[in-house]
Amino acid sequence: MATDPGIGYKIKGIVLSIKGECSAGHKVGESFDVSCHNPAGMCGWLYHDIFPSLQTFQFGGNLPWWEGDIIQLQCPDHINLVTIQLERFKN
């Protein structure tokens, strides 16, 4: 099993909202520590979809529409849409 080497920023995630019912069982208010090395029990579809943004975010990068150290991302299931917030902290 891979171990998280703790490089880059520490990322804390929280489920903000769910439109419909998440088939993976995520619940509003659920929180987790996630990284490029640790999917934190997140649904595979969600983790796969957010990974490029997570990678950029964890290693200090930004996209033009991001402001600060908090971003919101969504899963690919638009019928049962899960919205999460990621916040980064210096290790």
Image (cartoon, rainbow, N blue to C red):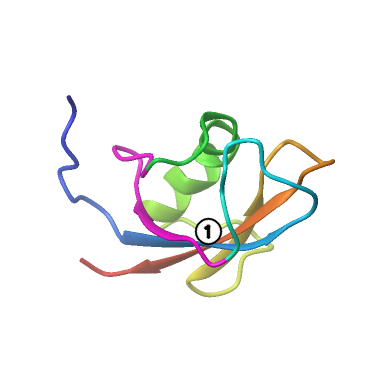
Is residue 34 one of those drawn in magenta? yes
In the image, is residue 35 above or below residue 85? above
Nearer the observer, 22 or 66: 22
Q: Secondary structure at mark 1?
A: loop
Nearest the viewer among 73 and 31 is: 31
The image shows residue 35, relative to residue 84, as above or below, that is above
- Residue occupying the point 50% across, 38% down: 51
Segment colored magenta: 29-40
Q: Quadrant of the C terminus?
A: bottom left
Name the chief secondary structure element in magenta. Answer: loop
Q: Position of residue 3 (x, y in %)?
A: 16, 36
| Residue shown at 60% from the left, 56% from the top | 63
Quarter of image, res 78: top right
Q: Position of residue 89 (x, y in %)?
A: 32, 70
Amino acid type at mark 1: Asn
Q: Residue furthest top?
A: 1
Total labels drawn: 1
Query: Picture quarter containing residue 39?
Result: top left
**Residue farthest toward the bottom in the current orientation of the protein:** 68
Residue 82 lies, with reference to residue 4, above or below; the image says below
Residue 9 in picture, x, y percent from top left = 30, 60
| Residue in the foreground of this view, choosing between 71 and 16 | 16
Instruction: Please state if 72 lies on the left or on the right of 9 as rendered.
Output: right
Name the residue carrying label 1.
62
Q: Is residue 22 left or right of residue 35?
A: right
Instruction: Determine the residue positioned at 64% across, 53% down.
Output: 73
Left or right of residue 88, residue 14 in this image: right
Determine if the magenta segment contains residue 61.
Answer: no
Quadrant location of the N terminus?
top left
Dot 1 crowding, Cα within 10 Å, few <14, some 14–19, many 20+: some
Q: Position of residue 23 (x, y in %)?
A: 65, 36
Say whether residue 7 is left or right of residue 58.
Answer: left
